Image (spheres, rainbow, N blue to C red):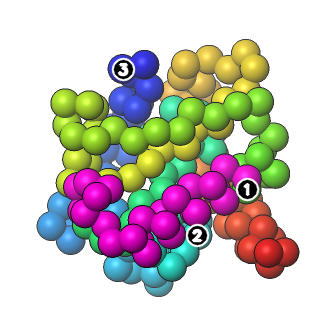
Amino acid sequence: MQRLWAPWRSQYLKSFEESVVNEENGCFLCAAARHPEQDAQRYVVYRGEGAFVILNLYPYNGGHIMVAPYEHVAALEHLDLDAYQSLCTLLRDAIAVLKEEFHPDGFNVGANLGRVAGAGLPDHVHFHIVPRWSGDTNFMPILADTKVVSQSLEEIYHRLHQAFQRYYHRQ
Ligand SMILES: [Zn+2]
């Protein structure tokens, strides 16, 4: 389980991450939260009331997303109840959207709270949702090619963005 949230990183993505992280006090989630006009570039697929959904740039598997509050807090108990409920609702809805769009056989859902628990970004709490398919590998070998990764991210971004719109349109 230890490597679950510590995926492979390419040099290209790493330099992208560094350029993003240098903004907003080093927090790429805050940078994404505060720049809705850049949602497509930052792969923010959906914005809820108190939380948002963003693609993981170092996917453990296709469709690996993160759900985070807008607020920069390290612990769930530091969120007010509205933001916490918004986060939990979005976590539920995001799983439903992933099911509809990608038909996975299961999910890994979880949060790494604190660096010792493996959090790459310990100061801004977030949940990972990783769709799983029967027979998928720990690291999809195809993702070892950075070009393929970016194309996959683009495609997954557009599919999920539309899937969220459809999902909430029906609610
Ligand atoms: Zn933050």
Depth check, front residue: 127 or 57: 127
Amino acid on which disc 1 is placed: Val
Depth check, front residue: 66 or 112: 112
Judging by the rendered image, the residue that carries numbered circle 1 is 97
Q: Residue furthest left?
A: 25
* Image position of 99 with respect to 52: above or below: above
What is the span of residues highlighted in magenta in the rendered image? 73-96
Q: Which mark is residue 109?
A: none
Q: Quadrant of the N terminus?
A: top left
Residue 135 in the figure: left or right of residue 80:
right
Assign a secondary structure to mark 3.
loop
The location of residue 40, given as percent across then percent down, is 54, 70
Q: CA distance from mark 3 to mark 2?
A: 28 Å
Q: Earlier in the sequence, mark 1 or mark 2?
A: 2
Judging by the rendered image, the residue that carries numbered circle 3 is 2
Amino acid on which disc 2 is placed: Tyr
Judging by the rendered image, the residue that carries numbered circle 2 is 46
Q: Residues within 10 Å of mark 1 (few under 14, many from 20)?
A: many
